């Protein structure tokens, strides 16, 4: 279990513990996402890939401080590209008062390691390459998220060597 030490806005050390999301966490996490993303986030095309599909429970993780306050959360969904399966990373968000202290990186690294241990081969996301390249994500050529996604923001990471090699086509819902 990773418990990254971060500094809160009072300057005192805050210890966050990562754990698997529980059913009762759902709406608290939704509120954090509402706070962290622009209004209308659920209208984004990536949300169409999640509709009526269960997230990958083992990879949905929360970071709480010693008093139980939610500092960050990450979720993953399964998706398909033709015959291939992939993980869709996100949403991931850190509360504005805890940003920039490594909590986002801790959530991402922790869950990518778990995804590798669960033998997922490849991960996909829609996001800013300048942030995600530190985890090994790079732009995917020929992998098409539902429009109107900017292709420059479609990024992938191999958990197994060569896993994105021949994968091209439209990303679709898992079921
Ligand atoms: C993106 C987010 C999850 C990162 O979490 P965090 O705990 O703040 O990030 P970390 O502390 O691990 O990393 C901070 C570093 O990432 C950089 N960074 C954060 N967001 C970035 C972005 N969108 N593009 C480029 N760099 C970014 C910071 O400038 C900082 O850089 P530094 O290490 O050179 O100082 C968080 O900022 C957040 O919740 N943002 C709002 C929601 C969001 O945009 N989610 C991602 C959707 S793709």
Image (cartoon, rainbow, N blue to C red):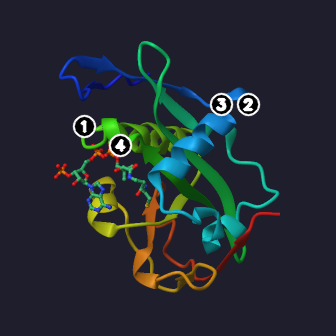
Q: Nearer the viewer, residue 138 or 53?
A: 53
Please state which of the two labelled residues, at mark 4 or mark 2, is closer to the viewer: 4
Q: Which residue is mark 3?
A: 25
Identify the image quadrant of the N terminus. top left
In which image quadrant can residue 44 be found? bottom right
Q: CA distance from mark 4 to mark 2?
A: 24 Å
Secondary structure under tag 1 reads: loop
Say if disc 3 is inside 8 Å of ligand 1: no
Q: Nearer the viewer, residue 175 or 6?
A: 6
On screen, residue 130 above or below 171: above
Sooner in the amino-acid sequence: mark 1 or mark 3: 3
Sooner in the amino-acid sequence: mark 4 or mark 1: 4
Q: Which residue is mark 1?
A: 101
On screen, residue 114 above or below 78: above
Q: Nearer the viewer, residue 78 or 33?
A: 33
Mark 4–mark 3 contact, CB under 8 Å? no
Mark 4–mark 1 contact, CB under 8 Å? no
Sooner in the amino-acid sequence: mark 4 or mark 3: 3
Please state which of the two labelled residues, at mark 4 or mark 1, is closer to the viewer: 4
């Amino acid at each position: 279990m990773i418990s990254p030490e971060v500094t809160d806005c009072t300057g005192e050390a805050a210890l966050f513990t990562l754990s698997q999301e529980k059913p009762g966490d759902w709406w608290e996490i939704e509120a954090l996402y509402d706070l962290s993303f622009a209004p209308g986030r659920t209208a984004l095309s990536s949300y169409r890939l999640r509709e009526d599909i269960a997230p990958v429970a083992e990879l949905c993780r929360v970071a709480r401080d010693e008093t139980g306050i939610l500092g960050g959360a990450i979720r993953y969904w399964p998706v398909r590209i033709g015959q291939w399966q992939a993980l869709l990373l996100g949403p991931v968000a850190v509360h504005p008062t805890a940003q920039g202290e490594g909590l986002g990186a801790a959530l991402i690294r922790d869950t990518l390691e778990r995804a590798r241990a669960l033998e997922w081969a490849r991960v996909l996301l829609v996001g800013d390459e300048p942030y995600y390249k530190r985890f090994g994500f790079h732009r995917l050529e020929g992998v098409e998220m539902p429009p109107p996604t900017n292709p420059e923001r479609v990024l992938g990471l191999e958990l197994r060597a060569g896993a994105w090699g021949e994968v091209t086509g439209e990303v679709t819902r898992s079921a």
